[in-house]
Amino acid sequence: MSRNILLISTSTTHGTGYLEHAEGEIKNLLQGKSRLLFIPYARPDSVSHKDYTAKVREAFEKWGISVTGVHEAKDPVAAVKEAEAVFIGGGNTFLLLRQLYQNNLIKPLQERVKQGTPYMGTSAGSNVAGKTIGTTNDMPIVFPKSFEALQLVPFNLNPHYQDPEPGSTHMGETRETRIKEFHTHNTQPVVGLREGSMLHISGDRITLKGSLTARVFLQGQKPQEFKPEDDINFLLEAV
Amino acid sequence: MSRNILLISTSTTHGTGYLEHAEGEIKNLLQGKSRLLFIPYARPDSVSHKDYTAKVREAFEKWGISVTGVHEAKDPVAAVKEAEAVFIGGGNTFLLLRQLYQNNLIKPLQERVKQGTPYMGTSAGSNVAGKTIGTTNDMPIVFPKSFEALQLVPFNLNPHYQDPEPGSTHMGETRETRIKEFHTHNTQPVVGLREGSMLHISGDRITLKGSLTARVFLQGQKPQEFKPEDDINFLLEAV
């Protein structure tokens, strides 16, 4: 497979600007490309598609890449089919997935990525690249027709992964407990991606980027921590 | 309406035993009743229906109330129709709602509660008493056929409500941001119920119980804090 995918935990880490911490990896992903199709459907903080796209455009123009918002296209399916590269930004995962279904973009996106069109996602845009959105942290503010996502990779993502806070008096579930509950009804691996971390998938090779370890949850097993230099290719063989 | 409903944020507050902090309100809700039907579908920490019911049974037997788990009944619908009182416990809201639909319990529960059968819920069991489960904090580990819930009250609940942490470096959305995003696609009020808080609905009167204030979110308005002695009956008039 010729896929070329970058799944980023968060667009903005504490103390850095928008996409700044991922600049090197993004440039690597998009080398040789001059145009990027941005999908703003997740609308963080209820920002408009237009304003969200303007923010993204500003970031990429500095790097010599021009940005079109998919909402600007008369025919979003055609826009995906013609895209040189695709970026799905963060926000609400349920809203994002519903819009992807409503605009019939699931299959065209899958096909483009299979053909090698670079794909990058941040937060919700990383969630929808997984098998399902069943490990999103977001509130279910709208009802999508399915939780099945783009399935660009055969596992699930949990962006903004948080470790349990020592000494917390809060009785709500920890992130780890939630993922454990997910595995009582689902078999695919889940990658807990801490803020600042990324996964780069190039063909049949997957690499963890950033300085932190990632927490990998396999059904019925103890969670494991993997360092950026570790071999995590088993994730691509999950079924 | 003769409804008699107790919606509890969390079954267990920090430093107290199971349901202990709500003992007075629970006894008040169930006065004159000797039997309780427990619905364990939400299965916190993947505990079995049997073990979850055993835990609940132990708590209520001390108070002279006998507990039957709905999973013990050959006909769950008949069990609801004959129940003296109903308790839906916490866990995963998506799993709970899916099981309520699969066992055809939505309408029977609505009818019993309208007729005055006491209903109590904790956490996920409070979520499903609202208009939709659109403001749950849980992971969408299974796909229910709808997010529409029991609608015993015309608003939504957010149990385990958490205020933003001052000085946090985490970039994921705060609870308040999430609820604000909910209101870009939904009109009903949302009650953020902090741990230790409860709502008691008796006929057309609603009262906040516990020592803390509750945060109420109305679409397009600034969130408001209400104290236990405040008049919050407007919540029952929401459409």
Image (tube, coloured by chain):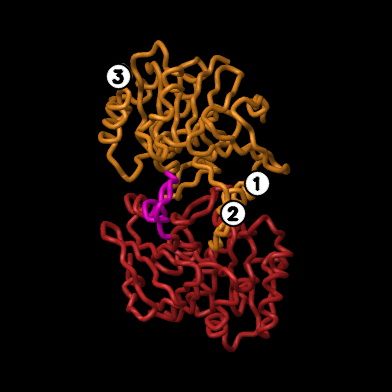
Chain colours: A orange, B red
Residue type indicated by callout 2? Leu
* Secondary structure under the numbered disc 2 in the rendered image: helix
Q: Which residue is mark 2?
A: B95
| Residue B84 versus residue B129 in the image, above or below | below
- Marks 1/2 in contact by CB < 8 Å: the verdict is yes
Residue type indicated by callout 3? Ser
Query: Which residue is at the far top?
Result: A32
Residue type indicated by callout 1? His
Q: Which residue is mark 3?
A: A66
Q: Which residue is mark 1?
A: A185
| Residue B74 versus residue A5 in the image, above or below | below
Q: Residue at x 42, y 44 (%)?
A: B171
* Nearer to us: label 3 or label 1: 3
Subunit ID for the residue under disc 1: A
Q: Are the residues under badges 3 and 1 in a single subunit?
A: yes
- Marks 2/3 in contact by CB < 8 Å: the verdict is no
Image quarter of the C terminus of chain B: bottom left
**Location of residue B51 (image quadrant):** bottom right
Instruction: Determine the CA span between mark 3 and mark 1.
Output: 42 Å
* Secondary structure under the numbered disc 3 in the rendered image: strand
Q: Position of residue A178 (x, y in %)?
A: 59, 50
Residue B111 versus residue B132: which sits nearer the camera? B132
Instruction: Determine the CA span between mark 2 and mark 3.
Output: 44 Å
- The magenta-colored residue range is B163-179
* Secondary structure under the numbered disc 1 in the rendered image: loop
Q: Position of residue A130 (x, y in %)?
A: 54, 33
Q: How many marks?
A: 3
Q: Residue at x 42, y 17 (%)?
A: A30
The mark that comes first in sequence, 3 or 1, is 3
Q: Main secondary structure of the magenta part?
A: loop
